[in-house]
Amino acid sequence: GQNIDQPTEMTATEGAIVQINCTYQTSGFNGLFWYQQHAGEAPTFLSYNVLDGLEEKGRFSSFLSRSKGYSYLLLKELQMKDSASYLCAVSNDYKLSFGAGTTVTVRA
Amino acid sequence: DVKVTQSSRYLVKRTGEKVFLECVQDMDHENMFWYRQDPGLGLRLIYFSYDVKMKEKGDIPEGYSVSREKKERFSLILESASTNQTSMYLCASSPSPGTSGTWEQYFGPGTRLTVT
């Protein structure tokens, strides 16, 4: 079976840093995705990790530890437009299993 | 840019009606997926297809069927809609990984279905 956990909600101030954790226990693993989803819109791809370590892409970074079944998404220099849900998803071949999502609210 | 389109953004149907949700992608992707998204539950896979006329059940296939007659089109069918099928339905497509090595999925805008 698949078990993917992430916090339900997080709140942070504009300009700050927020770290969204994701832990997983899955029957197969090819990689881990992070998606961003604004209210009423489609999820859009943010990052992909297949090897252990940190992947940096501008203000967003994602980390993976396969031995610990753990990932995090780091959002730096938060902007109001970063208010959204962030979805952690584990890939097993062409199937993705999603966590319930973390809603991030950025306050001025 | 990859484009995944869904036939309706909002749909209201009555209990017992047969409902068709259509999804079209324009990037020649092999794989297509149907999810439903509910608060607190995240995205749950209903069905996926890895080739024309091929389909596999996902995690919650009960009450749904699918059709893929052409590579670019994947339809979700609710044979007899029920109120517990009120949800946001998202379609996605992905290429086989090839040289990129990833199974990144591209999502459509979603259809919010209400069954009354």
Image (spheres, rainbow, N blue to C red):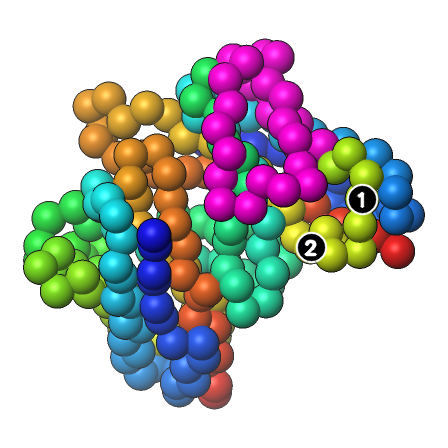
Magenta stretch secondary structure, dominant: strand
Q: Is residue B67 left or right of residue A54?
A: right
Labels in figure, total:
2
Q: Position of residue A103 (x, y in %)?
A: 47, 73
Write down the quadrant of residue A6 in the picture. bottom left
Segment colored magenta: B52-77
Q: Using the image as rendered, state which of residue B64 and residue B41 is in the foreground.
A: B64
Q: Which mark is residue A106?
A: none
Q: Is residue B85 above or below residue A72?
A: above
Q: Position of residue B3 (x, y in %)?
A: 53, 31
Write down the quadrant of residue A38 in the picture. bottom right
Chain on which label 1 sits: B
Q: Amino acid at mark 1?
A: Ala
Write down the quadrant of residue B4 in the picture. top right
Image point (72%, 51%), residue name: B85
Image point (34%, 54%), residue name: A2
Q: Is residue B57 left or right of residue B79?
A: left
Q: Using the image as rendered, state which of residue B18 and residue B5 is in the foreground.
A: B18
Which residue was labeled with disc 1? B81
Which residue was labeled with disc 2? B87
Q: Secondary structure at mark 1?
A: loop
Upstream in sequence: badge 1 or badge 2: 1
For label 1, the crowd category at 10 Å Cα-Cα, with few meaning under 14, some 14 to 19 and many 20 or more, is many
Asked if residue B69 shows in the view, the reply is yes
Quarter placement of the C terminus of chain B: bottom right
Image point (45%, 49%), residue name: A44
Q: Position of residue A100 (x, y in %)?
A: 46, 64
Q: Is residue A82 above or below residue B54?
A: below
Asked if residue B26 shows in the view, the reply is no
Q: Secondary structure at mark 2?
A: strand
